[in-house]
Image (cartoon, rainbow, N blue to C red):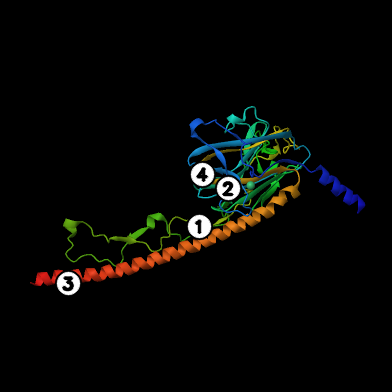
Amino acid sequence: MRAFALAAAATAVNAEVYFKEDFNSGADEWTQSTWKGSEMGEMESCAPEVQVDEDNKALCTKKDARFYGASKSFDTFSNKGKKLIVQFTVKQEKDIECGGGYVKLGPKMEDAKKFGDPTEYNIMFGPDKCGYTKKTHVIFNYNGKNVEKTTALDYKQEVGETQLYRLTLDSDNSVKVDVGGEELYKGEMEKDWDLLEPKEIRDPDEKKPSDWADEAMMDDPKAEKPKDWVEEDQKEIPDADAKQPEDWDEEEDGEWEAPMKPNSDYKGPWKAEQIANPDYKGPWEAKLIANPKYKADDNLYLYKEFGFIGFDLWQVKSGSIYDDVIITDDEKEADKLVEDWKKLNAAEKEKKEVEAKKTAEKAAAEAKDKKDDTTKDDLDDVDADDDADDDQDL
Ligand SMILES: [Ca+2]
């Protein structure tokens, strides 16, 4: 027990929060990028409409069809031998249509004003949507290449609701993604990101054997064509019921021949029954061999340096709200923010429900008014028609 308590205490002491930002004292310490010139919008400090804590402020995008770039640096660290947790919240006040909502973490930048798409980063994480293409991005940089997860993770953003994103990267090269406090993904970097060359490949020197059986089915060698099989030349036969017309003149018309009719016994060309080919072993593939290009790496997770976090975005529709960013090696530190998020998300859901009810009531009232008006109009029309008829009668 004592040893366990000591170990737990040691973990707590070693726990580190590398970066934490609640934006409650504004966003002045964030550097706004200018890499796209006049096409850029500023990520501003704002007070979200729905609040649990009324002094709360967040970081917002306010202009449509703009690039956004805002970053903040911190004391550099490496995640060597440690767990890395990145967590933040995103809310979209309206349908973003096409735009990102993710964060990038990377080594210290020389010039944060140039932060943008070409900037080198280690990890990119968060929601991304363009029309029907929607996903929760997890991109790792490996040897200078940005590598996306081979199968995309679901998009979990709902308009008008703050969503909570957490990425956990561990020193055993495992990855976990939690969205809204629920596990969205758990797996391994090597398996689910094409970071390394494949472990095994098909032997390029192996040739398909000349006697390889390509067909799964074959003619039954025991099958025999029935002796009475009607061949194709018997497809049509003279009509036995036909009679020579009485006025047939053999001298003039030639010898009478009965007209042909289809032979009902003809069943098409004879084919042997099909049986499974006992030699068939499936489609040929060269055998798997160890890939000489494969180089194992137990440190896929390891980044020498983290020095900034930033938002590098393009948004068709703005109205994104970011808050409660934390980078830590301690789950408990990240967990502390989960309860706040739950309260906020519940308040937002409640507001949405109230608004949806109001909208439905308004629509119902309008539909009723319209119906009353239409009925009145119809009656007027009937009167007008009657008048017209009366005029014609005269
Ligand atoms: Ca805040």
Q: CA distance from mark 3 to mark 2?
A: 63 Å
Q: CA distance from mark 3 to mark 1?
A: 85 Å
Instruction: Please give the residue where the numbered disc 3 appears in the rendered image.
Output: 386
Q: Nearer the observer, disc 3 or disc 2?
A: 2
Instruction: Please give the residue where the numbered disc 4 appears in the rendered image.
Output: 318
Q: Quadrant of the N terminus?
A: bottom right
Instruction: Please give the residue where the numbered disc 1 appears in the rendered image.
Output: 225
- Mark 1 burial class by Cα count in 10 Å: few <14, some 14-19, many 20+: few
Q: Earlier in the sequence, mark 2 or mark 1?
A: 2
The amino acid beneath tag 2 is Ala
Q: Is residue 341 left or right of residue 317?
A: right
32 or 207: nearer the eye?
A: 32
Q: Is residue 147 left or right of residue 170?
A: left
Task: Tell whether circle 1 marks a residue whose Cβ is less than 8 angstroms from ligand 1.
Answer: no
Q: Nearer the observer, disc 2 or disc 1?
A: 2
Q: Earlier in the sequence, mark 3 or mark 1?
A: 1
Q: Position of residue 202 (x, y in %)?
A: 66, 38
Q: Position of residue 18 (x, y in %)?
A: 73, 39
Q: Nearer the observer, disc 2 or disc 4?
A: 2
Q: CA distance from mark 2 to mark 1?
A: 88 Å
The amino acid beneath tag 1 is Lys
Task: Give the label on residue 47, or none.
Answer: 2
State the image quarter where residue 260 is shown. Answer: bottom left
Image: 168 above or below 121: below
Q: Judge whether residue 214 can be spotted in this image.
A: no
